[in-house]
Amino acid sequence: MENIHFKIAETAQDFEDGKKLFEEYAASLYFDLGFQGFKNELAAISLQYQPPEGALLICIYNKEAVGCAGIRKLSENTAELKRLYVKPAFRRLKIGKELLALAIDTAKKLHYQYIRLDTVPGQEKAQELYHHLGFYTIDAYRHNPIAGTIYMEKKLID
């Protein structure tokens, strides 16, 4: 029987698991995340992705960290979704959809009114998921040098 559960990172081990998943995510991309200050983000992962301004969600499958999603403060009323990632061998389990739904719920609980993200060509399945869960396309809210970057947002309050 499959044993899947989700948690918000609290311990040093949780953040270390998240860091490893972030690194695996970065290695899977066709470009370098240096323009986003990725090394600094990894060094401060437990500061950037913790309440009350953020959270790091981890999916555990049979005691192995297999997926993650980060939420961090973008502005007073807007959170940013970062590093939604599921290891390829586990994508058939719909973990990404659950992580995204939990990220949205967590952003609401942190009292954000909006959640934003950017996504690049080659992430079409993720883009479909974002649309399915209510994200819509917006103008660029930050610099991303990758051609074809799409910026999205979801309103969290009625």
Image (tube, helix red, strand yellow):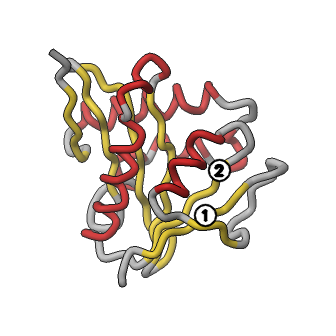
Residue 101 located left or right of residue 134: left
Assess whether mark 1 and mark 2 are in contact (beta carbons under 8 angstroms): yes
Residue 76 located left or right of residue 32: left
* Sequence order check, earlier mark of 2 and 1: 2
Say few, some or many: other residues with alpha carbon within 10 Å of mark 1 (under 14 / 14 to 19 / 20 or more).
many
Provide the secondary structure element on which disc 2 rests: strand
Q: Quadrant of the C terminus?
A: bottom left
Determine which quarter of the picture holds residue 39. top right
Which residue is depicted at the point 26% across and 35% down? 14
Name the amino acid type tagged 1. Answer: Met
Above or below, 129 relative to 12: below
Mark 2 and mark 1: Cα distance apart in space: 8 Å
Q: Quadrant of the N terminus?
A: top left
User: According to the image, label 2 marks what residue?
Assistant: 119
Name the amino acid type tagged 2. Answer: Thr
Residue 48 located left or right of residue 143: left
Most distant residue in the front direction: 132
Instruction: Give 51 or 65, whichever is nearer the viewer.
Output: 65
Provide the secondary structure element on which disc 1 rests: strand
Residue 52 located left or right of residue 88: left
Determine which quarter of the picture holds residue 137. bottom right
- Residue 43 image point, x, y percent: 46, 41
User: According to the image, label 1 marks what residue?
Assistant: 152
Which residue is depicted at the point 24% across and 47% down? 8
Say few, some or many: other residues with alpha carbon within 10 Å of mark 2 (under 14 / 14 to 19 / 20 or more).
some
